[in-house]
Amino acid sequence: MLKSLKRQNHKLSSPEGQIEVLDDAESINIPSFEDKMADIGFSQFKPTGIEIFQVNVGKMCNQVCAHCHVDAGPDRKEIMTKETMQQCLDAIEGTDIKIVDLTGGAPEMNPHFRWFVEELRAIGKDVIVRCNLTIILANPKYNDLPEFFKKHKVNVVSSLPYFTAKRTDAQRGDGVFDKSIKALQMLNAVGYGKEGTDLKLDLVYNPAGAFLPGDQETLTAQFKRKLLEYDIEFNDLFAITNLPVSRFLEYLVKTEKYEDYMHELVNAFNPAAAAGVMCRNTLSVSWDGYLYDCDFNQMLELKVNAPSHISEFDLKALSNREIILNQHCYGCTAGAGSSCGGATT
């Protein structure tokens, strides 16, 4: 069955600050993702458990990246309150949820960020921070972040689109590559990414255009070789597919690549990748405390099929919920698959 994929009426912020509304009438016909999943035995798509609690602590960021599905930037005012953070702590304390993955925006810009990390570690949770690297140099008050991360044994996951300035700056802004290199060197200096330490430093690669990422293992080897020229070491690299949401959707529409990209995702559908997508073991929490199957559903405001606010957290109901699927899910099931931890196959 073909399903009309409509460009939903999302307000999109361009790097220039302009607001555009995509025409809801324009659509393309591609196979229904729900039907595709039913064909491979997932007529009901449910979690395998909740192992990762991913929390977006705010959309404020010191950068305006061209591919950002959160539409984050310096002008965003959405920030998680300390009260909502406490509700998150209360919800997961004493549960088998092992990992808390902090995202933004730049999560470090939340005024309660450090308190939240300390409290999460105090209740025995492993913490991931999605750090854009340049935040470390954005203001003197952030310069000690490498030491803070080390003190609390935070797993730092950092976005670095490429190992050259030209491609990185094109996606993330002028001067970002040089600042990112400096920040990585600062993290290495305190032990991150170094052999023999337990301080994990992972990188994230996103394609710079309307195409799927290359082989993750090959990319990892390339990045390790090239970054050694700057005396930089890291642990793993995660290759993540750009989903047609927010700024990347805007890019696809402006460059008239939207339809071709969607067909590329559909044609690359991989049943093995579909079985291992991140929504099966992850729960996403928005800055205002609402719950979603993943952070892409969060940006599309597709709340969970269960009690949907952290204040009414019900682990049993959430563990048995039916995951909400939509056409953008093709992005996570294409090729080797894509998740916040990179390829799924």
Image (spheres, rainbow, N blue to C red):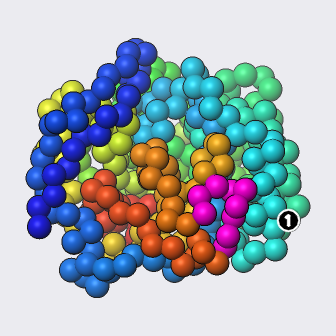
Which image quadrant is residue 167 in?
top left
Give the total number of marks visible in the rendering. 1
Return the x and y of residue 234 as percentages of the image width and height. Answer: 58, 54
266 horizontally vs 305: left or right: left
Q: Is any part of residue 304 visible from this angle?
A: yes
Q: Nearer the viewer, residue 171 or 12?
A: 12
Residue at 35% from the left image edge and 63% from the top image edge? 325
40 horizontally vs 300: left or right: left
Return the x and y of residue 270 as percentages of the image width and height. Answer: 25, 72
Magenta highlight range: 307-315
In the rendered image, residue 308 lying in the magenta stretch gets the answer: yes
Q: Disc 1 marks which residue? A: 123
Residue at 51% from the left image edge and 61% from the top image edge? 304
Which image quadrant is residue 113 in?
top right
Return the x and y of residue 2 as percentages of the image width and height. Answer: 11, 61
In this rendering, the answer to whether 87 lies above or below 49 is: above
**Residue type at mark 1?**
Ile
Return the x and y of residue 209 as percentages of the image width and height. Answer: 27, 39
Q: Quadrant of the C terminus?
A: bottom left
Residue at 31% from the left image edge and 65% from the top image edge? 333
In this rendering, the answer to whether 207 lies above or below 140 is: below
327 horizontally vs 1: left or right: right
Residue density around tag 1, few if under 14, some if 14–19, many if 20 or more, within 10 Å? few
**Among all residues in the image, which is located at the extreme right?**
122
Q: Nearer the viewer, residue 237 or 14?
A: 14
Q: Nearer the viewer, residue 48 or 304?
A: 304
